[in-house]
Image (cartoon, rainbow, N blue to C red):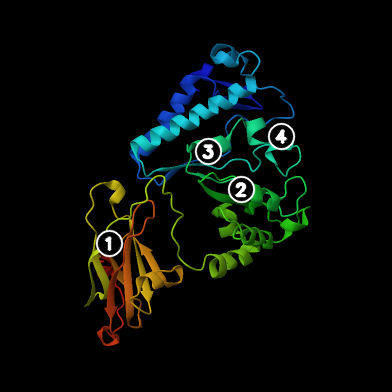
Amino acid sequence: MKNKWWGWEYDGKTFFDPGIPQVREHTKNVVLDIVRRYDIDGIHFDDYFYPYRSSVYSKLPDHKSFKQYGGKYYPNRLEDWRRENINILIKDLSKAIKEEKRWVKFGVSPFGIWKNTSSPQDNLPTTDATSNYDILYADVIKWMKEGWIDYCAPQLYWAIGYKPADYAKLLKWWDAHTYGRNMYVGHSLYKINPNSEEIAWRSPLEIERQIEALRQTDNISGSIFYSSKHLIKRKDVAPLREALKENYYKNYCLMPKMPWIDNKAPSPPRTVQFVSSSRGNRIAWQAPFYKNEMDKAYRYIVYKTATDKAKEQLTAENIVTITGDTNYFLPANSKGGYYMITAIDRMHNESKAEVVKIQQDQLSSLVFQKNDSMSNEM
């Protein structure tokens, strides 16, 4: 650490001290450097704010910064001061990100318990346990109420029925505390183990049960899996992988919208047409005109439908692809029908559909095989 006075050692690790204004400013500048340099969709913070408590080290070594920067909180409101430090950081980050690029989302994946049952007025269903509010000093509920974050993804890394922290009960609590912001659930793939002491985690079916449960809620918008490497590489998780592919995520879909950032749909694609050539049969279009980055078409959705009644046909089951290209090559042996093309912006607001009808006799019966030169051409 270049400025050693910015942090302290705790439990064998070096931590930046959130109570020092220069640390918060440095953190903001690092994030803004990423936002400015790269075409990113969002900034995601995990659950690390103040450190998790160690069984060896009982107190955090921030007494010097508390004395220097505590202000009205010093000397009797140390925990409130710590929470305010993180509040300032999150608020400043949110403001700076949106001023730089309004479409960049800002979200947090906190520990799955906001407070514990020592705060009965919050109606929390857990026993006395580690919590964001009391241990990590992360008041994520305030951040959602104030609109400082666009989404929250609590790490509900426990099984349904686990008494100290029941997934089902916590899911219900978080579902009731979204405050108009998007909420996703974090699932613990890493806990799947045929030799687990917890019976629930001996089978990947636990994750399926959790997905089924969240899909019965009103305000949970989706899932985040930790970590994807378990889903991709492990043979014992293959049944879950197939279930996600063939059942839960069988169809394409749009990301949950964030109307507080932008709810204006882009203009539809221009000059949508069917083209048949030596390169194959395709539907081609031109990008719509736009006035600013928020109105720009970011992706296109291609639907294949039975009729040209757009309102009835623009469903997930009818999506054949979502692409950043301005053409779609029809697979070999495609049948005629209606194709509807829409544009979506960075916030997944969707335009009206442009329709092209393809007759069966328009489709070439030739089967084209791409060679190197054709691949380069395409």
Q: Residues within 10 Å of mark 1 (few under 14, many from 20)?
A: many
In 3D space, how far apart are the residues under numbered discs 1 and 4 (Cα atoms)? 51 Å
Say the numbered circle drawn on residue 119.
Answer: 4
Q: Which percent across, then down, holds residue 47?
A: 58, 38
The residue singled out by tag 1 in the image is 268
- In the image, farthest residue toward the front: 121
The residue singled out by tag 3 in the image is 145
The residue singled out by tag 2 in the image is 176
Residue 174 lies left or right of residue 332; in this view the side is right
Secondary-structure class at tag 1: loop
Task: Point out the tag, 4 or 3, that comes first from the N-terminus.
Answer: 4
Q: Amino acid at mark 3?
A: Lys
Q: Amino acid at mark 2?
A: Ala
Q: Which percent across, then down, holds residue 64?
A: 59, 13
Q: Amino acid at mark 4?
A: Ser
In 3D space, how far apart are the residues under numbered discs 1 and 3 (Cα atoms)? 35 Å
What residue is shown at x 71% (from left), y 24% (from top)? 57
Task: Point out the tag, 1 or 3, that comes first from the N-terminus.
Answer: 3
In 3D space, how far apart are the residues under numbered discs 2 and 1 (Cα atoms)? 36 Å
Residue 132 in the image: above or below residue 251:
above
